[in-house]
Structure formats: C-alpha cells, structure tokens
Amino acid sequence: MLFLQWQMLQKYTWPYSDLLIKMGVISMWKQMKEDIAAIFERDPAARSTLEVVLTYAGLHAIWGYRISHKLWKSGWFTLARMVSQFTRFLTGIEIHPGARIGKQLFIDHGAGVVIGETCEIGDYVTIYQGVTLGGTGKEKGKRHPTVGNNVIIATGAKVLGSFKIGDNSKIGAGSVVLQEVPPNATVVGIPGKIVIQDGVRVGCDLDHVNLPDPVADMIRQMQRDIDRLRNELETLREDRKENERSIV
Ligand SMILES: CC(C)(COP(=O)(O)OP(=O)(O)OC[C@H]1O[C@@H](n2cnc3c(N)ncnc32)[C@H](O)[C@@H]1OP(=O)(O)O)[C@@H](O)C(=O)NCCC(=O)NCCS
C-alpha cells in the first residue's frame, strides 16, 4: 500500500519535484517510510503498515517531534513546545523539540518516555516505555545524555546527566545510569554498572540485597580496636600487680 502511495506521489508531483525537494516534502516522506521500516525490523508483533501507522504511539511521537523540531529550529519556540505537549497528550511520550534525533529511532510501547532538551540520539536507537533521558538538576547548557548509534535502552531505565552512551551498548531494564558508558557495553543496576564489555562478562557484584554498609563496618572495626586495647590494658595491669608482689 505504501509502495502504491509512493508511486502516485511520484506520478502527480513529478513536474513539481524540485519545489517539493526544496520544501523538504520528499525527504520527509522518505523519513516516514524509514520510521515504519524500523518498526518492522525490530518489532516481531508488527503485522501491517496500516496497523503500524494507526496504532504505534512511538511512531506518532516521532512524527510529532519532527514538526515541533522544525518549528524550534525556525525560532517558533512556544509553538514548538505546544506541538510537543499536544503529542505528549496523545501518546504519553514527551520529546523536547530541542532534542536532536537521528534516523530510525524506535520507541516501543512508549508511555512515560521523556527525552530532554539537550539530548542527542544517534541512528537505529531503540527505547522502551518508561525511559528517561534527563538531567540531574537545574544546570544550564548541555545537561542531557548523548546516545550513540544502535543503542538499546530497556524499559524503565533512567539515564541522567551530560555524558555519552557508546555505540552498540545496552542499558538494562530499571537501571539508573549516571556516568559515561563505553561502546559495546551492557550496563545494569542502580547505579548502573558494566556487566558485559565487548562480549566478555566483566566481574561485577550484582548482589543488590546485601549492599555494603561503610558506617556499620567502621563501628565494628572500632569495637575490635577497643576490645584489643582493653585486653592489652588488662595484661599490663596484671604485669604491674605481679611486679609489685615480687618487690614486696
Ligand atoms: C540489559 C539486557 C538487554 C541484557 O541482556 P544480555 O546482553 O543478554 O545480558 P544478560 O542477560 O546475559 O545479563 C548479564 C547479567 O546482567 C544481569 N541483568 C540483566 N538485565 C538486568 C537488569 N535489568 N537488572 C539487573 N540485572 C540484570 C543478568 O542477570 C546477568 O547477570 P549474571 O551474569 O550474574 O547472570 C536485558 O537483560 C534487559 O534488560 N532487557 C530488557 C528488554 C526490555 O526492556 N523489554 C521490554 C519489552 S516490553
């Protein structure tokens, strides 16, 4: 169906193709086709183009973002934010119009996804529901992450701060990532730790139940020192008593 639409578009717009290229209509159409292709490549549940176009909130959010980003770049900041908020109202996905997104981003399910203003996202990235690409506070300037190409950010993960997630990396479900991730790494946990790097398992304690308690460790060490000193004092007292007895 999409192929037919494409042929019709070419047939009827051919005389005006230069104008349409200048207006960016043809490149926009190409981008839309790529967005749909990305879904078929990465979601085994996708069955038909019609279903994808009508029911994928992630796709609607990306198309809404494209409009708001164009407005943002043209200086229509408030209108851009309004389009972005309206898209959020429809999809539950908030993409700031100032964010920079590469080709074939796939947002699966989508609800609760937040992508901040100074975020940069590379090509072929996959993001699941509940992901936040945000800042850590009220800092100004570049304050959101830069995500490389082919990155997967699993459901509920939070990536907070201005650092890079390297190409081909995976961020595990529910992780909170607060520092740079090298390329080809898998990061899991809170705070996020690298567990796989270039296909090799990295030694990492994933025991999230028995977390270390430095204060309790310090108190235990002090108690051991006090016991040792007490024993030494007791021995010295005994020695002194012995000496006094031998003098008498
Ligand atoms: C991060 C992820 C992509 C890693 O997959 P992987 O590269 O195959 O790595 P593994 O599954 O071998 O996991 C490596 C280690 O991390 C642990 N781990 C994996 N995901 C984890 C997570 N989200 N939180 C905590 N630990 C995790 C594994 O238990 C394993 O530990 P072990 O070495 O002690 O056994 C995957 O686990 C994940 O989180 N997928 C979520 C996908 C998603 O969001 N689906 C939603 C669909 S709606």
Image (spheres, rainbow, N blue to C red):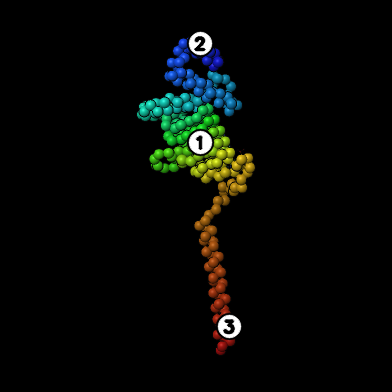
Residue lying at the far right in this picture: please name it: 200
Q: Residue at x 55, y 77 (%)?
A: 236
Kindly identify the amino acid type of the residue bearing the numbered disc 1: Val
Q: Position of residue 41 (x, y in %)?
A: 59, 26
Residue named by callout 2: 11
Ligand 1 image position (quadrant): top right
In this rendering, does residue 172 appear at all?
Answer: no
- Distance from disc 1 to disc 3, alpha carbons, whole Å, reads 75 Å
Kindly identify the amino acid type of the residue bearing the numbered disc 3: Glu
Q: Label 3 crowding class (10 Å Cα cut-off): few <14, some 14-19, many 20+?
A: few
- Distance from disc 1 to disc 2, alpha carbons, whole Å, reads 39 Å
Q: Nearer the viewer, residue 76 or 54?
A: 76
Mark positioned earlier in the residue sequence (1 or 3): 1
Q: Residue at x 51, y 28 (%)?
A: 103
Depth check, mark 1 against mark 3: the one in front is 1
Helix, strand or loop at label 1? It is: strand
Residue named by callout 3: 242
For the residues labelled 1 and 2, say whether their Cβ atoms are less than 8 Å apart: no
Mark positioned earlier in the residue sequence (3 or 2): 2
Q: Residue at x 57, y 76 (%)?
A: 235
Residue named by callout 1: 147
Q: Position of residue 168 (x, y in %)?
A: 57, 36
Relative side of 79 to 186, left or right: left
Q: Residue at x 46, y 41 (%)?
A: 161
